[in-house]
Image (tube, helix red, strand yellow):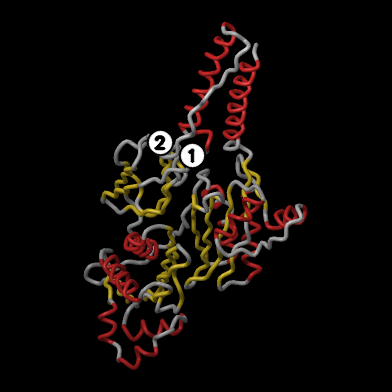
Amino acid sequence: MTQLSIWVGALGIGICSYSAKALAADTPSATLLVFDLDAQGVDASLAANVTDALLGAANHLKGYRALGSKEMQAIVAYQGQRQALGCSDDACFAALAIDLKGDLLMAGSVAVSGDSYVLAVRLVEPQTTRIVGQVSATAFSPEELLANCALIPASLLGQGALGSRASSYQMELGTQAAPTKLALLELLAQGVPADLADNLTQTAALELKQIPGVSVISKDEIRALLQLEAEKQLLGCDQISCLAEIGGALGVRFLVAGSVGLVGSTYVINLKLINIVQAQTDNRVAESFVGDSAQLLRATRAAVRALVGHGQAGEGSLEVRASVTDVSWLLDGQETPTNGPRRVAIGKHNLRVEAPDYYPWLSDIYVEQGEATRVDVTLTERPNPWYRRWWVWTAVGVVVAAGTAGAVYWQTRDRSGALEINAPSPVSGARP
C-alpha cells in the first residue's frame, strides 16, 4: 500500500471517527447545569430550597447528570477561573455553561402573584442561548411548591408531565327560580395592562352566567349598587372580612375576587370564592401557563370552571399542523399520533412538537368543550454541526475518490514523477 493510500485511508478513518464521537455527544450521559432560582418577592431561603428540590429531581433523569451551584463553584475553583455564579440572564448563564462543558442549563425564578407562589423554570441550550423547554407551576404554600419540583425536570425534557391540581369542591347551585347569587369584582391587573384585566373580568362573568342555577352580579352592576366613595375604599381590599362586608351589601351568597398577572413569561390568573355567610374562602384557583396571550381567554374560563367545580368534564378537538414533515408531538408528556384532529379532554395541556434537526416547539394550550383547536407550528432549524453539512462529505468523497484513482495510477506510472490531488474548497451556504 502506498503512502497516498495510507493518507487517504487515514483521512477517511479520522473523519468517521470524529463524526462518531460528535454523534455520541448527543447520547447519554449529558450534563445538565441547575442554576440557583431567582427570588422575586419571596424569601431567599424558599428559592434555595426549591432549587435543591429541582436538583434532586434532575439527578433522577435518564441520560443526564445534574450539577448544582456548589458543584459548579468547585469546578470553577479547580480550573482556576474566577467567574462568579451570580448571573441574571441567559447569555451569562450560557457563557458559564460552555466553560463548564454543560450540554443544557436550567434556570428560573420563584415569585408571588396574588395569593399564589409561581415557579417558572426554563431549559436553555448554551451554544445558542435558545430556550428549548419551559414550564410553570403554581402553589398556595411553600410545601406545595416544593412538591411540584419532583416532576418539573422530567417535564422540561419531555420525559413526563406536570399533573393538574385536583379539587373535589363544588359550589352549591340554586334553581332557575331561586338561583345562587354571586358577585364578581373586577380582576386586579398585576404586570398586565388594566384594559386586559377588564376584558378578562367580562370573560369570567360570561362563563359564570353559563352555569345553570347561578345568577351573577357583574362589575357594571356592582358599580351601580355602590356609592362612588364606598367603591374608592375597595381599592386594595383583599381581606376576607372586608370582602364579606361587600358581599353582604350586595345581597349575594358568594363573592368572586382575583387578579391576572404576568411573571416573566408566565401568565397567572388567581381567583377565590368567598362564602359571605360564613365569611371564609370556600375555594381558590391559580391558573398559570406559558404561551401566547391569546390563550388568556380560555385560561380564564378554565379557572372559573375550576373555582366553582362545575363544567370541567368534556372533550374538544385538537389538531397540530407543523411547518415540516416527519414531526412527532407529545401531549402532556405522552407521544400522540399526528394524523389529523384528536379528541382530548378540555382544559390545559402541555404541547411539545419535535422534528429531527429542528428546535422543539413548546407551549401550554387550552381546549374548549365541543370546539376545534388548531395549532399551527413553525419549527426553527438547528444549525448543522460541520460533520453533518453536505459539503464536508462532498469534499471527503472527492478526496477519497481521487485517492483511489491516484493509488491505481501510482502503481502503473513512472514513479519518478510527483502526484498532486486538488480538492474543491468547501462551499458555504444552506443545504439545497
- Seen from this angle, which residue lies furthest top? 412
Q: Nearer the viewer, residue 49 or 2?
A: 2
Mark 1 in CB contact with mark 2 (< 8 angstroms)? yes
Residue 145, horizontal then vertical, whole percent: 56, 62
At a point 33% along the width and 44% down the height, the residue shown is: 320
User: Label 1: which residue?
Assistant: 384
Q: Nearer the viewer, residue 423 or 216?
A: 423
Task: Count neighbours of disc 1 (C-alpha within 10 A) and say few if under 14, some if 14 to 19, many if 20 or more.
Answer: few
Residue 66 is marked as none
Label 1 vs 2, first from the N-terminus: 1
Residue 422, relative to residue 217: is it above or below?
above
Helix, strand or loop at disc 1?
A: loop
In this rendering, does residue 108 appear at all? yes
Residue 109, horizontal then vertical, whole percent: 55, 64
Label 1 vs label 2, nearer the camera: 2
Quadrant occupied by the N terminus: top right
Residue 158, relative to residue 23: is it above or below?
below
Q: Hey, what amino acid is under mark 1?
A: Asn
Helix, strand or loop at disc 2?
A: loop
Quadrant occupied by the C terminus: top left
Residue 397, relative to residue 127: is it above or below?
above
Residue 229, horizontal then vertical, whole percent: 34, 93
- Seen from this angle, which residue lies furthest front? 416
Q: Quadrant of residue 147?
A: bottom right
User: Label 2: which residue?
Assistant: 431
In this rendering, does residue 305 appear at all? no
Q: Is residue 223 left or right of residue 86?
A: left
At a point 62% along the width and 50% down the height, the residue shown is: 98
- Give the CA distance from mark 1 to mark 2: 10 Å
Residue 180, horizontal then vertical, whole percent: 30, 72
Task: Count neighbours of disc 2 (C-alpha within 10 A) and say few if under 14, some if 14 to 19, many if 20 or more.
Answer: few
Q: Hey, what amino acid is under mark 2?
A: Arg
